[in-house]
Image: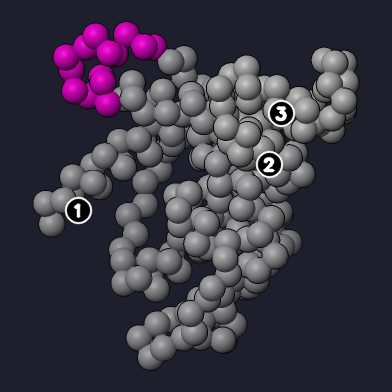
Amino acid sequence: MYKITYMNQINLDYVNSDDAMEIDIGIRDTIMGVRISILSMSLGLAKIKSQALFKTLGFKSMLEYVNNLSSDTKTGRSGIYNWLNIGEAYIKYQTELLEAGFSESDGPTKLPYLERALAVRDKNEVFDNVRNMSLRDFIEFSKGEKTGPSDNTLYIVIKGSVVYIKGRRAIIVSKKIGRRTTKYLMRVILVACRALNNGGLIMPVFVRNKKEAERFKMVYKRVMAEVRKSS
């Protein structure tokens, strides 16, 4: 059972507004809605393939169904197959994705590259990055091209619940504190390590729930773009 939910209803009235903030929030909510639509459509395609439902629709194969769908909707076959790959990847790794906190708004278009990333990268790092990275960055990450350590680089590697810095074991998070708590702390440590490796700073922000987190992310991205533009 694959349940797709969306916390905010999309109100398209923002197109008639003259309020910049209202328009911006409306655009961002619509983008999230599009992502959810992509995942729902992808899961539908995966179900038609896995259960051979194309036969019920009068087609002999998935290829024949995709060709017909492409023709009827004026959509490229490569795009339809990419959606199919998204659905199959989500079904295969749904448990791990949900445990990592992945949601529809994190961008399902990264999922076709998930298996490739798992073949060359640490599992925990992969599922953290599929949430946090942009599509372009995750594609590069999935290639597994690691640069070696230099004098000015900390070169941090995370394996399971152990963090290595320059090849030395630096942090061990006990699994006895519970799987959920361990995963949460490892995500926090990963963010801290990235900041440390890039010479950045961390500013903790507490939010009460996922809904607040999603709204905060929208505001954060806009504000950071303005800050970096003026710096």
Task: Establish if 140 lies above or below 196.
Answer: above
Badge 2 marks a residue whose secondary structure is: helix
Q: Look at discs 1 and 2 and give the one toward the viewer.
A: 2
Whole-Å distance between the Cαs marked 2 and 3?
Answer: 13 Å
- Name which residue lies at 66% across and 38% down: 81
Q: Mark 1: few, some, or many residues within 10 Å (few <14, many ≥20)?
A: few
Determine which residue is flagged by label 2.
85
> Label 2 is placed on what type of residue?
Asn
Q: Can residue 174 be seen here?
A: no
Q: Position of residue 216 (x, y in %)?
A: 36, 36
Q: Mark 3: few, some, or many residues within 10 Å (few <14, many ≥20)?
A: many
Q: Can residue 142 be seen here?
A: yes
Res. 191 image quadrant: bottom left
Q: Position of residue 124 (x, y in %)?
A: 63, 60
Numbered label attached to residue 228: 1
- Name which residue lies at 19% across and 23% down: 20
Q: Position of residue 198 (x, y in %)?
A: 35, 71
Check contact, mark 2 vs mark 3: CB within 8 A: no
Decide which of 169, 92 is in the foreground and name it.
Answer: 92
> Label 3 is placed on what type of residue?
Val
Main secondary-structure element of the magenta-colored stretch: helix
- Name which residue lies at 31% across and 63% down: 201
Determine which residue is flagged by label 3.
66
Task: Establish if 161 lies above or below 26.
Answer: below
Q: Mark 2: few, some, or many residues within 10 Å (few <14, many ≥20)?
A: many
Task: Establish if 117 lies above or below 73.
Answer: below
Decide which of 153, 52 is in the foreground and name it.
Answer: 52
Residue at the limit of the structure toward the bottom, as seen here: 151
Q: Which segment did they paint magenta?
A: 11-24
> Label 1 is placed on what type of residue?
Arg
